Amino acid sequence: MMKMKNLKLLLLSIILIKVVGHNNLKIQKHIRVSTENSKNQFKVLKIERL
């Protein structure tokens, strides 16, 4: 009985890690895109000031 419970917990945690990892990739991609956008805006601001 105890082994089955542990196995289920292990499977759940693996699934959870996979899902969270997938979401993390999406979030990282989003952050990268937004930082790129802000860098570009900063460059534009610098150019406009000159």
Image (spheres, rainbow, N blue to C red):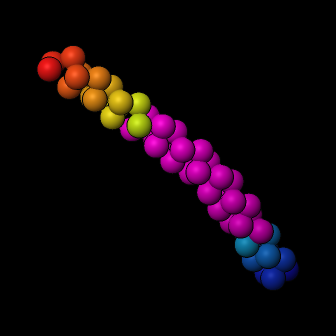
Residue 9 location, quadrant:
bottom right
Residue under the point 51% across and 48% down: 28
In the picture, measured across the screen, residue 19 lies left or right of residue 3, that is left
Left or right: 26 in relation to 38? right
Check if residue 37 falls in the magenta segment.
no
Instruction: Give the quarter of the figure containing the N terminus.
Output: bottom right
Picture layout, residue 9 above or below residue 30: below
Q: Residue furthest bottom?
A: 3
31 falls in the magenta region: yes
Location of residue 6 in the rendering, given as x and y in whole percent from the top left corner: 75, 77
Who's the residue at 54% across and 44% down the image? 29
- SS assignment for the magenta stretch, majority: helix
Picture layout, residue 15 above or below residue 38? below
Residue 46 image point, x, y percent: 20, 25
Q: On the picture, is 17 further left or further right than 27?
A: right
Residue 36 position within the rendered picture, expressed as x and y whole percent measured from the top left = 41, 37
Residue located at (84% from left, 77% from top): 4
What residue is at 28 percent from the left and 29 percent from the top?
43
Q: Quadrant of the C terminus?
A: top left
Q: Is residue 27 above or below residue 39?
A: below
Which one is in front, 48 or 35?
A: 48
4 vs 37, nearest the viewer = 37
Range drawn in magenta: 11-35
Could you say which is closer to the camera, residue 24 or residue 48?
48
